[in-house]
Image (cartoon, coloured by chain):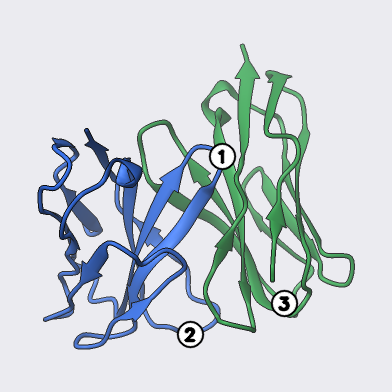
Amino acid sequence: KQEVTQIPAALSVPEGENLVLNCSFTDSAIYNLQWFRQDPGKGLTSLLLIQSSQREQTSGRLNASLDKSSGRSTLYIAASQPGDSATYLCAVRPHRDDKIIFGKGTRLHILP
Amino acid sequence: IAGITQAPTSQILAAGRRMTLRCTQDMRHNAMYWYRQDLGLGLRLIHYSNTAGTTGKGEVPDGYSVSRANTDDFPLTLASAVPSQTSVYFCASSRTTGPNEKLFFGSGTQLSVL
């Protein structure tokens, strides 16, 4: 059964620093991996989707990479800002069952 | 603004009562989903619908039912609520069931069953 893990569960970083969030998954047979942002009391917003044939995707200060063979993805946030404070979740869409499986998220706090 | 609307925003419900959570989208998306989000357990799929007129069971369907009479609406019903159904419920949609479609989420319904 596919499992998605995000470590650490929480992270505090001073403003302006670059940071990396980690996501690992147990079965490499996936269609894609998505990174989402969730603000307190809100729904999830899709940030980046990396198809299985791709190695990375970029949007502004965000860069997501995918290494399917090792079952890992990273979300790189450059020049962090207080507005980046949120919970970041990764999710994979496996070939088997075809239903998206979410990690439990990393709660990020950018210190002003 | 186009998107997904969920109602109510929050609800306190006595155990044993029936409750319907509403979800409407105006993006003409074919696929819709209901998730619950619980601390320590993350997001889990309750039910889904690939297109109007069809529904399917997700990971945790027991105690819940759904219907999809049209493209826009996907209500979730708790026939007889129990305290373990206290959770935040999210409705989501995607344009199709294609493997690389992005998911769009509503703002959620906070449900407390006492």
Which residue is identified by label 2? B98
Which residue is identified by label 3? A52
- The amino acid type found where label 1 is placed reads Gly
Q: Residue at position x 22%, y 69% from top?
A: B65
SS at badge 3:
loop
Looking at the rendered structure, whether the residues under marks 2 and 3 are on a common chain is answered as: no
Q: Residue at position x 77%, y 72% from top?
A: A27
Query: Which chain appears blue?
Result: B
- Left or right of residue A22: residue B100: left
Q: Are marks 1 and 3 in contact (CB under 8 Å)?
A: no
Which of pointers 1 and 2 indicates the residue nearer the eye?
Answer: 1
Residue A32's x, y, as percent?
Answer: 64, 73
Query: Which chain appears green?
Result: A
Q: CA distance from mark 2 to mark 3?
A: 14 Å
Residue B75's x, y, as percent?
Answer: 17, 65
Tell how many labels.
3
- The amino acid type found where label 3 is placed reads Ser
Q: Residue furthest top?
A: A112
Mark 3: give few (<14), some (14-19) or many (20+) Cα within 10 Å.
some
Vertical order, B50 against A54 (above or below): below
Q: Name the mark on residue B40.
A: 1
Label 2: chain letter: B
Label 3: chain letter: A
Q: Residue at position x 52%, y 27% from top?
A: A83
- The amino acid type found where label 2 is placed reads Gly
Mark closest to the chain's N terminus, 1 or 2: 1
Quadrant of the rendered structure where residue A73 is?
Answer: bottom right
